[in-house]
Image (tube, helix red, strand yellow):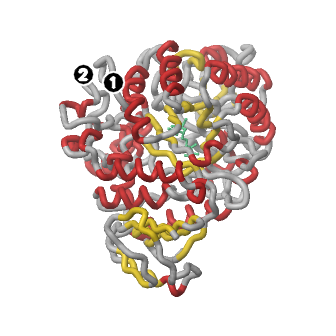
Amino acid sequence: NNDKNWFHNAVGYQIYPKSFYDSNGDGMGDLKGIIEKLDDLKTLGVDFLWINPVFKSPQVDGGYDISDYYAIDERFGELSDFKALLKKAHQLGMKVITDLVVNHTSNQHPWFLESQKSKDNPYRDYYLWEDARSNKMPNEWISFFGGSAWTYDAQTKQAYFHVFGKEQPDLNWKNPKVRKEIYKMVRFWLDLGLDGFRLDAISHIQKMPWSYKIKSWHGDGPWVPFMNVSGIEQYMKDLKEIFDEYGALTVGEASGVRSTQAPDWTDDSGYINMIFELEHNARKANGDGHVYQMKKTLIRWQKDLLERGWNALYLENHDQARVPDVYGDGSEACAKAFAVAYMLLRGTPFIYQGQEIGMRNFPFQSVTQMRSKELIAQYDKWIERGWDKKAALLKMTKNSREHSRTPMQWTPEKNAGFSTGTPWMEVNPNYTTINVAAHSELRMLYAQLIALRHQSSAISDGAIKFHFERHLQAFVYERENYLILVNLGQKKAHLDFETTSVSTDRNYEHVLGSKARTFRAKMILDAWEYQVFKK
Ligand code: TEU
């Protein structure tokens, strides 16, 4: 498909390589493992893959701490494996994108090791250093992972800035040398045949002046000084120029870009193709109230990007807990309802590994089962403050990103067929029933939804109109001649279409549903019921 907007009817599949498939029995997934599973993904129907970082990294933050942008981490394989992966994916007609992590590097990156040496080191300005004292940081800004965004260096009596962990120093984008290095690296991967990027934390590359005082410590307040700050435009334009040259597919993780600003970022002349908004899953708690918050946010993004711009649609990723546990009762019925609800929206859907089989949150019993270093560090702090272990563990694991990182469940055999060795993270004990080989209805439903997106231009490109917007759990929308109804809750949902603009006298064809149904002006949806009708 040479069409510039080919991604409008495409579906992406996200792979967290460490936990996808282990081909060599060392307990960790790898590139060869991904290659072995490409046919399975093709059968599911996905059009492209987003593979989380596989670059050389100390793995303090799941590979989002890169120490060599040009090398594959030995845990995952080597460059030849990456090339083989691209080749086979391309043969199967699938594109591949991976993360572009350029807000920061690892503190083990040679640039930072140099930068750290002295104030006059030629690499000093590759990062953000400011005068400080051991007990007085340049400002009160805090990092996403908790604590000051500055780390003091006694040797040079300065501190360096990091919006994530202290092992992830932020690059100084104001330095033209840094930009040149990054743009060169972007070209290297595109020249190699990579099809594009998921732009990690891209909205943070520009910072306010250090003198900026934080006005609110709630919500997004503390992050304002490095969220889509003006001045970022030029950097994005530079990147766009390169992306355009290669026709690269680009998805920006761009929190702080508001839904009203997203059209400018993602329309035909925008910097990138689409945005992962982080707002719809910003508040994590169980219950209908939360589903309603999610629904409202999704609807706002759909409406604000209707005329111009394009959405990236997702429910799960490697930073999110599993949907059936966060929003529902964990059942497959619940997972199916959510699948239908988001897969037919306007935008490009992403499926996160395991989501298609209804993988669940992990039943953590002990901190020794956790792997995210920043969460373990926070756990230790709670213990220091006198919390008991159980409470601290719950605090750190309740809907945390740990849950999404357990090994993929392929079969009911040992280690869920993920590895013949000892998995780097424990497999969810429910693998005996939840696995790919079980051919679950959920996985078949995903295949059906993908096929529907491929076949119907109403679903891929058509307009969208919402109904019952204020209903707490019913998610109802029209995509031209399609009518989609989902009950995102356990209570029955009463819908009276006489109160809407939906014509009730038509004969609707039943496209798919959780049970047989004829369209009626008045309908009562069961728990987790979904229906797709077509005029
Ligand atoms: O996540 C970053 C991320 O979620 C923030 O950029 C976000 O803007 C902020 O938390 C909003 O509240 C990405 C990766 O997905 C994650 O796994 C990494 O840990 C992180 O970047 C650092 O690279």
Above or below: residue 181 compared with residue 264: above
Residue drawn where x is 76% and y is 29% of the image: 245
The residue that disc 2 covers is: 421
Residue drawn where x is 52% and y is 32% of the image: 94
Q: Quadrant of ligand 1?
A: top right
Residue drawn where x is 73% and y is 56% of the image: 308
Q: What amino acid is found at the position of numbered circle 2 in the picture?
A: Gly
| Local secondary structure at mark 2 | loop
Above or below: residue 511 compared with residue 424: below
Quarter location, residue 203 = top right
Camera sees residue 366: no
Residue drawn where x is 40% and y is 20% of the image: 32
Is 485 in front, or is 264? 485
Where is residue 366 drawn, in percent x and y?
Answer: 25, 40
Q: What crowding class fits label 2: few (fewer than 14 Cα within 10 Å), some (14-19), or many (20 or more)?
A: some
| Local secondary structure at mark 1 | loop
Is 285 in front, or is 309? 309
As drawn, the label of residue 22 is 1
Q: What crowding class fits label 1: few (fewer than 14 Cα within 10 Å), some (14-19), or many (20 or more)?
A: many
